[in-house]
Amino acid sequence: MCERSQITDLNQLRVFAEVARTSSITAAARRLDKPKSTVSRDVARLEQSLGTVLLSRNGRRLVLTEAGELFAEHAGRILAGVEEATDAVAATVPVARGVVTVQATYWLGHALLVPHLASFMDRFPQMNVVLELKDFANLSTHDWDVQLTAGALADSSHVARRITAITLRLYASAGYVSRRGVPTKLGDLEQHVIVDKHWTNGTSPWPGGAGARPAAIKPRLVVNDMIAIAEAIREGAGIGWMPSFLAERTPQAEALVPVLPDLKPASMPVFAVFPRRRSASPKVRAFVDFLVEAFAE
């Protein structure tokens, strides 16, 4: 095996750790936001430096060799140690400064977070923000300071602070209602055009067991982004659930019509989530405290 001094690139360790976690070059590249060719090259260079094979292919999956399992375990400790050392130093700085890396799903980032970033940067001139918008499935498991997430919390190893709750109601455009009429009960939706979402993480607003959409209600348009759903509803595509605050932002000329207003609205909690080891970081505290304050107004 080559001398340890030849392994000097922490980025290669991070890449290998992600490939080991996902068992896939493609998945690791997506999570790291890197080209697949770069991920493959980093793994190959790491194997060359170590003088051994770390990964082998089993069908469509990559599996760790015995050496790969051993190296993944130690690499994980090294990366965790680097993060802990960085956080420990950051916690000694009394003023919030530096870069805070924030991840959010596309619609939460656009609709909730971006409108407040200018105020945050004005208040904290020594801080910069890196905002990464992704779909829910691709939110990374590492290399972030704060995640904005809605719905049920899955990872108890992190700290979560509830920053707000989003009210969801059924809406349609005035044009759609004039063409198709107004449903008066939930069952009437079976005869209407429904715009729906791939609801994840326990966020489905549909009444009934576990938020499942009634089987007889068949959506004609299914979208994975709430901003796109809101736009489709405004354009008369059909009836769908959307946050009340987005409906209220609709220009008066395109006013939306509440559908089944007596139906109990759904409430979707929104959390700021951060790794427990970073709870003492001034930059993380500053960002999360700012969000809690901003949404309390």
Image (cartoon, rainbow, N blue to C red):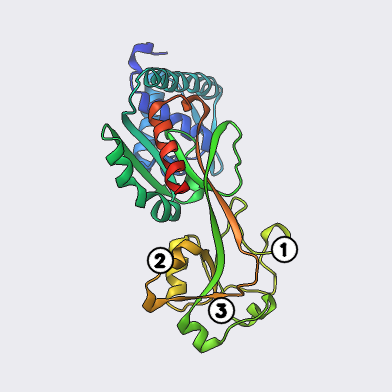
Q: Which residue: 44% across, 36% down?
A: 289
What residue is pinned by disc 1? 208
What residue is pinned by disc 2? 249
Q: Nearer the viewer, residue 33 or 172?
A: 172
Q: Which residue: 42% across, 29% down?
A: 14
Give the image location of residue 89, x and y in percent. 37, 17
Q: Which residue: 38% across, 42% down?
A: 33
Quarter holding the N terminus is top left
Decide which of tag 2 and tag 3 comes sooner along the chain. 3
As helix, strand or loop, the secondary structure at mark 3 comes to loop
Give the crowd class for mark 2: few <14, some 14-19, many >=20 residues within 10 Å: few
Give the image location of residue 253, x and y in percent. 37, 78
Question: Residue 11 vs residue 275: left or right?
Answer: left
Q: Is residue 289 above or below residue 294?
A: above
What residue is pinned by disc 3? 193
Q: Which residue: 65% across, 69% down?
A: 263
Give the crowd class for mark 3: few <14, some 14-19, many >=20 residues within 10 Å: many
Image depth: mark 2 or mark 3 in front: 2
Please state which amino acid type lies under the numbered disc 2.
Arg
Whether pointer 2 and pointer 3 mark residues with C-beta atoms closer than 8 Å, the reply is: no
